Image (spheres, helix red, strand yellow):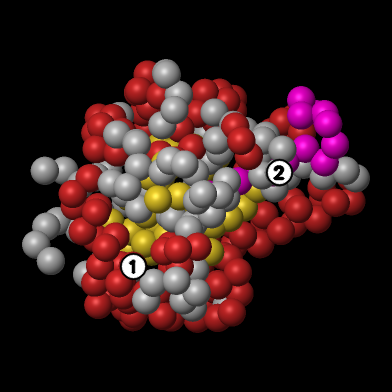
Amino acid sequence: MAGDLSRLSLNQATTKHWSLREAVDGCVRAGIPAIGVWRDRLAETGAAAAARLLRDAGLHCSSLCRGGWFPAATRAERAARIDDNRRAIEEAATLNADVLALVCGPAPDRDIRAARMMVEEGIAAILPDAMQHGVTLGIEPLHPMFAADRSVITSLHEAIILAERFDSPHVKVVIDAYHVWWDAGVYHLIRRCGARIAGYHVSDWITPLPDMLNGRGMMGDGVIELRSLREAVDAAGYRGFIEVEIFNETIWKMPGDAILSLMCERYLAHVAPT
């Protein structure tokens, strides 16, 4: 396929039914240079074996998904989640991942303000581990429709303010077009991020939305101005990989190589520099 795929990365969610080895082999066949690894698939091989697999294939790890999920009803539960994030940091270091993406988690009760404080406290607790292992923590804001069950950090503005409070090169943000495209201030906020952008994810918002969680579209099938957002992210100074992260039951039914072929085609048509 003609075109520059040098910044393209496959987030494993896009080929949900593939093992890590299958996804790595698929990337090699498609000429995709990087992969975003999910921890459930990583657990099937182990971090050390996965690192060798990527290294032998010549693939870079653009991210490890996911850390976070900090809020919990009890002190013991919160401590357990901190410990799990510390394990995730070690895994990210073993993979030499560009970023550990933090999906921060929902409130365990109705107190969303307290949950946001738990997120900040959780990041503070794991930051020394991230610094020790040379791992970047990427706060990924989710669309507000996920506030009740996935993350109390629901705007790029919130994520930036949180990252700025730490003022550390190890705490940045991950921008996902699906979650931020709707925000009237998104271009201003991307400029404000500057060097704090640790990752950029793309998919599309299709209408009608078939499912809140598993309804993301392939690039070009929806309403997001993907190239304009990518240009803004680049203008802010980001030069890293662009991950395609799609949760979609219809796409998951396709053969994996067909998903990657379509993904590359649409990336070049709607996202990549022309």
Distance from disc 2 to disc 1, alpha carbons, whole Å, reads: 28 Å
Q: Are the residues tagged 2 and 1 within 8 Å (C-beta)?
A: no
Q: Is residue 15 above or below residue 139?
A: below
Vertical relation: 108 (above or below) 180? below
Residue to which mark 1 is pinned: 259
Q: Secondary structure at mark 1?
A: helix
Residue assigned mark 2: 149
Would you identify the image quadrant in which residue 214 lies? bottom right
Q: Is residue 266 visible?
A: yes
Which of disc 1 and disc 2 is earlier in sequence?
2
Left or right of 151, for residue 197:
left
From the top left corner, tell me how far across and down residue 255 is, in percent. Answer: 37, 76
Is 102 covered by the magenta stretch? yes
- Report the residue at 24% width, 45% height from top: 271
User: Which quarter of the picture shows residue 75?
Assistant: top right
Q: Secondary structure at mark 2?
A: loop
Give the residue type that dot 2 points to: Asp
CA neighbours of label 1 inside 10 A, class few (<14), some (14 to 19), many (20+): some
Q: Name the residue at 24% across, 54% down.
A: 266
Q: Which quadrant: the C terminus?
A: top left
Q: Nearer the viewer, residue 36 or 111?
A: 111
From the viewer's side, name the closer residue of 149 and 198: 149
Residue 35 is inside the magenta segment:
no
Highlighted range, magenta: 101-114
Amino acid beneath label 1: Ile
Q: Residues within 10 Å of mark 2 (few under 14, many from 20)?
A: few
Residue 97 shown left or right of residue 79 in the figure: left
In percent of width and height, residue 265 lies at: 21, 59
Q: Position of residue 182 (x, y in %)?
A: 44, 28
